Image: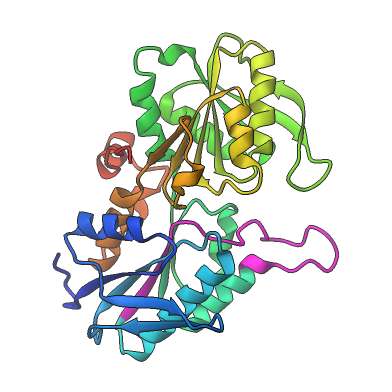
């Protein structure tokens, strides 16, 4: 890979998602950088960089998923280490951005933790951030450095186009709540199918109650699409409501499979036929069930890194105004893990 600025590209990884980092490096035909991120006996993180990075363009692959705080500290200390080692430019590649749901004050005296995390990543010395499907897109504005925000919808759309190619007229995309309507609409447009909305309310955090379904789902293969599945309460309650209203079957799709608390049990016991997730969050073998399909984001991350390194626009990867055929050519077919 050659860039006009002449800097070497180096890919490094924290401990949060080593497999994804290796897959991205393989797509780029670049060896994964030689570094170690370990913990002292008292719990403090330390980093060893075992090769020169002076004048190099550095990409650090680190999802800030569970354990969220440990992974954020790893990322911050790695950024600082590379900055002090005279790296030319540092891009934090954060496929899953933790604390993204704390993007506003929901009640008096609430923190805005997403803004705080953005500030400390910038202060640590990152020059740029590359992420996928922020829970709230306006979080890009929390950073005072460039943010490239890739979307999961085009990646998932490729999978479902192939899955339902012979029965696409009987497919309906469903938003699990009002907050995901824009995502569901975009997804439905890519598949050229109608969409519906689950109207719900939350009596308390991490719980939901379905009130009604807006749209016709009777006799349809329903795809419920969201940016993440956390405790799976929303998605499983919505799926039950869809089946009660005559759906043929229900498939869930998301970018981030957070899967905390009772999520695995809820999904396993639910009427959901399949759960399709991108691998922005590593899925432990202990959490893998037969319903799960994991798709790699390595191809799209590698393409974005190539463009950032080569000072080529990244916007065609996520710009809705880009011609659909041209965009599909930029988004490689996803491979099942």
Work out whether residue 42 or residue 139 is closer to the camera in this orientation and state it.
42
Task: Judge from the rendering whether residue 48 lies leftward or rightward of residue 132; answer left or right.
Answer: left
Residue 292 % position (x, y): 46, 34
Residue 193 % position (x, y): 48, 21
Residue 101 % position (x, y): 65, 56
Task: Judge from the rendering whether residue 3 lies leftward or rightward of residue 135; answer left or right.
Answer: left
Image quadrant where residue 24 sits: bottom left
- Residues shaded magenta: 89-114
Residue at 78% x, 57% y is 106
Residue 215 on the magenta span? no
Work out whether residue 318 or residue 304 is closer to the camera in this orientation and state it.
304
Q: Residue furthest left?
A: 2
Can residue 300 be seen? yes
Image quadrant where residue 155 sits: top left
Task: Judge from the rendering whether residue 6 lies leftward or rightward of residue 102; answer left or right.
Answer: left
Magenta span: chief secondary structure: loop
From what the image shows, is residue 21 above or below residue 220? Answer: below
Residue at 64% x, 34% y is 266
């Amino acid at each position: 890979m050659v860039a006009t600025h002449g800097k070497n590209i180096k890919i490094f990884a924290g401990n949060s998602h080593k497999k994804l980092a290796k897959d991205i490096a393989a797509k780029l035909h670049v060896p994964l950088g030689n570094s170690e991120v370990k913990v002292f006996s008292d719990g403090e993180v330390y980093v060893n960089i075992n090769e020169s990075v002076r004048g190099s363009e550095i990409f650090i692959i680190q999802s800030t998923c569970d354990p969220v705080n440990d992974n954020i500290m790893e990322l911050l200390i790695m950024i600082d280490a590379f900055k002090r080692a005279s790296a030319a430019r540092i891009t934090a590649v954060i496929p899953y951005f933790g604390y993204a749901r704390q993007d506003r004050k929901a009640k008096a005296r609430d923190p805005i933790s997403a803004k705080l995390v953005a500030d400390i990543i910038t202060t640590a010395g990152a020059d740029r951030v590359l992420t996928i499907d922020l829970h709230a897109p306006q979080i890009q504005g929390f950073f005072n450095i460039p943010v490239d925000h890739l979307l999961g919808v085009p990646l998932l759309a490729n999978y479902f186009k192939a899955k339902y190619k012979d029965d696409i007229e009987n497919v309906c995309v469903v938003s699990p709540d009002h907050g995901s309507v824009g995502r569901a609409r975009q997804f439905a447009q890519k598949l050229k199918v109608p969409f519906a909305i689950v109207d719900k309310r939350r009596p308390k955090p991490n719980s939901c109650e379905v009130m009604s379904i807006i749209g016709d789902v009777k006799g349809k293969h329903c795809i419920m699409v969201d940016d993440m599945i956390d405790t799976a309460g929303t998605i499983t309650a919505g799926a039950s409501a869809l089946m009660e209203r005559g759906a043929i079957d229900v498939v869930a799709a998301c970018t981030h499979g957070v899967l905390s608390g009772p999520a695995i049990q809820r999904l396993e016991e639910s009427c959901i036929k399949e759960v399709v997730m991108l691998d922005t969050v590593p899925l432990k073998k202990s959490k893998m069930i037969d319903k799960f399909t994991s798709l790699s984001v390595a191809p799209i991350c590698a393409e974005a890194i190539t463009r950032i390194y080569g000072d080529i626009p990244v916007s065609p990867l996520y710009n809705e105004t880009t011609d659909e055929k041209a965009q599909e050519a930029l988004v490689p077919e996803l491979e099942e893990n």
